[in-house]
Image: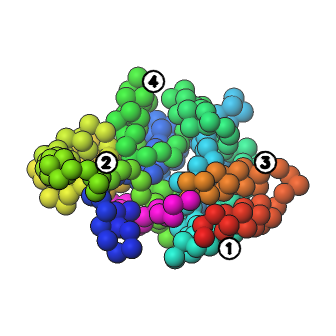
Amino acid sequence: MGNSYVNDGIYGLPYLRSTPILYLNKTLLEEEGLDPEGPQTWEEFEQYSETLSNDEGRVGITLPVNVWFYEAFVKQSGGSVLNEDETEASFNEAPGVEAVDYIKGMYDSGSIKVPTGDEAGQIALQDFSNQQSAMAFSSTADLTNYMSIAEENGFELNTAFMPKNEQFGTPTGGANLVMISSHPEEEKAAAWEFIKWMTEPEQTITASQNTGYLPMRQSAIESDEMQALYEEVPQFKVAVDQLEYAGPRPLNANYSEAQNILRDAITSALIQEDVTTQEALDEAAERINGLLN
């Protein structure tokens, strides 16, 4: 519900919500003698990436510079990308710097691949599909797609929490259902009936079963249908369990633009040898602070 509130008022109802999770090529993990349940900590994740990389071009993970994932890494280190009232950047404090330096260490060692540009996400998906990377971070909404990819390419798929540093932590994502207040009353009444119908347990169960998105009602999670699915395909339950450690994303109206600045700063810190992480993030924070107020 965190991203449904504005100034203590509810302005939408959650629908098709998600968190990022870790997708694992279980077959490759087992071939390399690794626990197929996946890494639990940053240290283990780094070890997995090193073990799963080889001289034939395979890497542990292809990891696009994605601010959604970065928010998770910062949260795992006990920090946040913005201060509590979202008026100043805080990603240039110790947790945010640690998160970038952690990824940079693996990038420099060659155990991860960091594609850039608009096609970065597609490159990561293709590498995982072709078994040129053994792990991937992506939305739980992509679960059924990843299951199809694994089946088509002859490997077993597992899912896990994003690994923890000081703690587990992820942002949420997805959508909310809203109506337009300026519309005629009869249209708002119809919209409200539709919203109520879409958020009924039956509809949220169907949506979750066919995608991987989180069920939006506790009653849906506890339903016989979802409990049977979790028993048969436990990959569906990982994101539900991870919700305990999840939090909302920033709601500042200019955060979308701020993300572009932050993404470019992280990219610079990773690939430019003459720029330190602190320098890149400090410069981005100064620019973003001008947007937030």
Label 4: few (<14), some or many (≥20) within 10 Å?
A: few
From which residue to which does the magenta span run? 241-254
**Residue that protrudes farthest toward the top in the picture:** 152
Label ID, residue 153 = 4
The residues tagged by marks 3 and 2 sit, at their Cα atoms, a distance apart of 35 Å
Residue at the image point whose x is 42% and y is 66% from the top: 247
Label 3: element kind: helix
Label 2: element kind: strand
Q: Is residue 229 magenta?
A: no
Quarter of the image where the N terminus is located: bottom left
Earlier sequence position, callout 4 versus callout 3: 4
From the viewer's perspective, tell me whether residue 205 is left or right of residue 75.
left
> Circle 1 is placed at which residue position?
93
The residues tagged by marks 2 and 4 sit, at their Cα atoms, a distance apart of 28 Å
The residues tagged by marks 1 and 4 sit, at their Cα atoms, a distance apart of 42 Å
> Circle 2 is placed at which residue position?
16
> Circle 3 is placed at which residue position?
271
Amino acid, disc 3:
Ile
Residue at the image point whose x is 34% and y is 35% from the top: 144
From where the camera sits, is residue 178 visible? no
Amino acid, disc 2:
Leu
- Give above or below for 9 relative to 27: below
- Residue 78 coordinates in the image, percent (x, y): 55, 74
- Residue 88 coordinates in the image, percent (x, y): 62, 73
Q: Quadrant of residue 210?
A: top left
The residues tagged by marks 4 and 3 sit, at their Cα atoms, a distance apart of 32 Å
